[in-house]
């Protein structure tokens, strides 16, 4: 029985991976927590797709749990939710010369500009609208 020994020098066949500076959380950040600059620190690490220093991510919300000292990607973050499922929200219907305001209960979460479904608490009907910067929901005019 013959044994073949093929010496391979891994360093000669693999490209050298240079480390670069990436941002990592200084503590574990739970889903839904909003990031601040004090939550992050730079480290030297080879991690393709990781967030680089100078990225404008403060104010974004964790979409998944971010573990301390572990790199993460931009798709692990989202715009902060202003409307949360089962919370009461202000419904607004605006038309030239007419503004109607009512109270509703959100049936889904949403960030600024997202479409959400809300139950009007007075009529018990479901309506769709767009989340506004103040957390209210602007109901679109229905076409017939």
Image (spheres, rainbow, N blue to C red):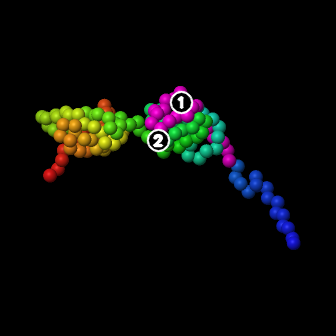
Q: Which residue is mark 2?
A: 63
Asked if the stretch drawn in magenta spans residue 20, the answer is yes
Which of the two residues, 128 or 107, is positioned nearer the viewer here? Answer: 107
For the point 47% across and 38% down, the residue is: 31
Asked if the stretch drawn in magenta spans residue 131, the answer is no
The x and y percentages for residue 110 are 35, 40
SS at circle 2 = loop
Question: Which comes sooner in the sequence, label 2 or label 1?
Answer: 1
Q: Residue furthest left?
A: 97
**Can the viewer see residue 117?**
yes
Q: Nearer the viewer, mark 2 or mark 1?
A: 2
**Can the viewer see residue 92?**
no
For the point 53% across and 27% down, the residue is: 38
Q: Residue furthest right?
A: 1
For the point 64% across and 44% down, the residue is: 46
Q: Residues within 10 Å of mark 2 (few under 14, many from 20)?
A: some
Q: Number of callouts in the render? A: 2
The x and y percentages for residue 104 are 25, 36
For the point 25% across and 41% down, the residue is: 119
Q: Residues within 10 Å of mark 1 (few under 14, many from 20)?
A: some
**Mark 2 and mark 1: Cα distance apart in space:** 15 Å
Residue range corresponding to the magenta coloring? 17-40
In the rendered view, would you say 115 is above or below 33? below
Give left or right: position of 48 versus 123: right
Q: Which residue is mark 1?
A: 39
């Amino acid at each position: 029985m013959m044994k073949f020994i093929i010496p391979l020098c891994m360093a000669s066949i693999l490209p050298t991976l240079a480390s670069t500076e990436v941002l990592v959380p200084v503590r574990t950040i739970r889903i839904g927590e909003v990031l601040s600059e004090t939550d992050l620190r730079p480290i030297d690490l080879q991690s393709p797709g990781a967030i680089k220093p100078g990225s404008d991510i403060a104010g974004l919300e964790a979409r998944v749990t971010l573990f301390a000292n572990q790199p993460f990607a931009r798709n692990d973050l989202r715009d902060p939710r202003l409307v949360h499922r089962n919370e009461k929200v202000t419904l607004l219907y605006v038309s030239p010369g007419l503004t109607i305001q009512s109270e509703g209960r959100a049936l889904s979460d949403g960030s600024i500009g997202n479409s959400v479904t809300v139950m009007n608490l007075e009529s018990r009907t479901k309506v769709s609208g767009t989340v506004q910067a103040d957390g209210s929901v602007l109901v679109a005019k229905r076409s017939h």
